[in-house]
Image: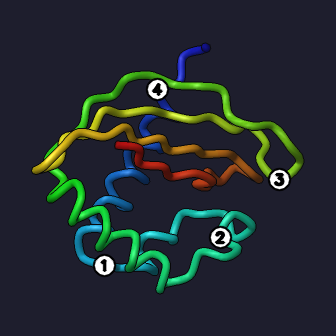
Amino acid sequence: MNDLKKELAVAEQYLTEMLEADRVGDYEGFIRRFDKIDLEGFGEDIFLKDTELMREELGVYQNRFYLGSLNGFKDDNHPRCLRFVWRAIYEKNEALIVVGIHEKDGVWYVNENTISK
């Protein structure tokens, strides 16, 4: 892929914010950077259940290592979509984190946040 330093910096910032929101159980902080179209069906109750389950299975987040980028899905709602992947170290286990972002009208939005153990 092309040089994605600026896009990676955006994804890193958004991931840091989402991990902090996970840590403190802050739903509004977690969804702050999401495009509203990508939040259908993802309410605060689901967020809180997910964070509780992650803490039980993975423990506390410790750090991450950037692995690379992937092309994102392309459609009218997600122009310039990119995905970034990290190896995350947690207290009990490791996981892969994928954050997808896309740009609309000069603003970057999150459209995907997946943690796979």
Q: Quadrant of the C terminus?
A: top left
Q: Amino acid at mark 3?
A: Asn
Residue 106 against residue 83 in the figure, above or below? below
Instruction: In this rendered view, identify the residue nearer to me: 17 or 114.
Output: 114
Q: Quadrant of the N terminus?
A: top right
Residue 113, numbered circle: none
Task: Indicate left or right for 69 with 79 as reference.
Answer: left
Instruction: In this rendered view, identify the residue nearer to me: 15 or 50.
Output: 50
Image label count: 4
Residue at (29%, 73%) from the top-left corner?
52
Q: Quadrant of residue 66?
A: top left
Instruction: In this rendered view, identify the residue nearer to me: 90 or 6.
Output: 90
Residue 77, numbered circle: 3
Measuring from the top left, give residue 31's x and y in whole percent. Answer: 51, 71
Residue 25, numbered circle: 1
Q: Earlier in the sequence, mark 2 or mark 1?
A: 1
Q: Earlier in the sequence, mark 1 or mark 4?
A: 4
Residue 5, numbered circle: 4
Measuring from the top left, give residue 8's x and y in whole percent. Answer: 46, 33
Indicate the secondary structure of the residue bearing disc 1: loop
Q: Which residue is mark 2?
A: 39
Check contact, mark 3 vs mark 2: CB within 8 A: no
Indicate the secondary structure of the residue bearing disc 2: helix
Check contact, mark 2 vs mark 1: CB within 8 A: no
Indicate the secondary structure of the residue bearing disc 3: loop
Residue at (22%, 65%) from the top-left corner?
55
